[in-house]
Image (cartoon, helix red, strand yellow):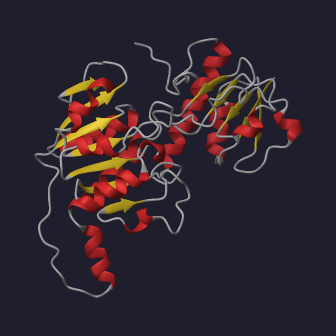
Amino acid sequence: MKQVVTVLPLAEEYRELLQSVSPELEFYHAGPGEVPDEILKKAEIIVGNLAPERVGMAQNLQLLQLNSAGADGYLEPGILPPGARLCNATGAYGLAISEHMLGMLLMLIKKLDLYRENQRHHQWKDEGSVTSIYGSRTLIVGMGDIGTEFGRKMHALGSTVAGVRRHKTAPPEFAEAVYTMEELDAQLEKADIVACSLPGTKETYHLFVEKRLRRMKRGAILINVGRGSLIRTEALIDALNSGQLSGACIDVTEQEPLPADSPLWDAPNLILTPHISGYFHLEETRRRIVNIAAENIRALLDGTELRNEVDFQTGYRKFRG
């Protein structure tokens, strides 16, 4: 029997789906609670984001299937036992997070946050002109599952969409082009909306600092739902205060939880949510994660290619060409 430990909240239907992969699997469903040491030491497959400092205890580990799209925290040498393979949950979050991005963007450009505040104060007040997605140019930085889903929605609403990826690929049917990271600066100058959904890696750390924000079209909007480390906080605040950016929508910050005294709270034209666009708030996300886990457990047993296997050097999924 192969020992499987799950560390995410699962309803009975999801437990049954995982068990149906093979009768040779024995499960311990910890949910969000602690896994006893004696159970963890026997684990050969872990499903969910077990605390990185505890993963090394599973010396028999063959597969860690994360419930997150990002793998930061699990990439450093010594976190996973030798020979263990790591897979993320890319493909589970595109629906939920792209809708969240669209909601934040519409709130900002239609000034719905201002009208909500006026409602709280019982003020019948016109906040003036607004902008539209129609006729805009959107640049997707990180055109994976999340970026692709957002780009498709923006195109449907009348925006011209382009993407940026690490590797040159053919553009999806709704996109004008897909560029490489070497072309990022040139494309930033053309975009009205820049939407970022990059993982947290050494290469993406502070990818957006003062110099790069100044390269953006003045009055552009910046969206970030990947990792807060992508944007230098002080640079974002300065860009909002100066009007270099007309607004920003962020679901992630450099420091989480965001301290109560952070100047980000009071930055102008900023829509801020506390890293909640994904997680399990949309039940469809959990269903997709479980399906990915089931697929990978089956692939591990059959000796076939894993879905979303992470390259420990880059922090991204292994590139298949």
In this view of the protein, which residue sits in the foreground, 70 or 60? 70
Rendered location of residue 77, percent (x, y) = 68, 25
Residue 286, compared with residue 275, is above or below; it is above
State how many labels appear.
Answer: 0
Q: Is residue 238 left or right of residue 76?
A: left
Rendered location of residue 57, percent (x, y) = 81, 33
Q: Residue farthest to the front?
A: 211
Residue at left offset 35%, top offset 65%: 267
Q: Quadrant of the C terminus?
A: top left
Residue 307, compared with residue 92, is above or below; it is above
Q: Quadrant of the N terminus?
A: top right
Q: Is residue 79 left or right of residue 255?
A: right
In this view of the protein, which residue sits in the foreground, 273 or 278? 273
Q: Is residue 156 left or right of residue 60?
A: left
- Image quadrant assignment for residue 5: top right
Q: Residue farthest to the right?
A: 38
Q: Is residue 232 left or right of residue 213?
A: right
Rendered location of residue 308, percent (x, y) = 52, 25
- Image quadrant assignment for residue 36: top right
Residue at left offset 17%, top offset 74%: 127
Rendered location of residue 145, percent (x, y) = 39, 33
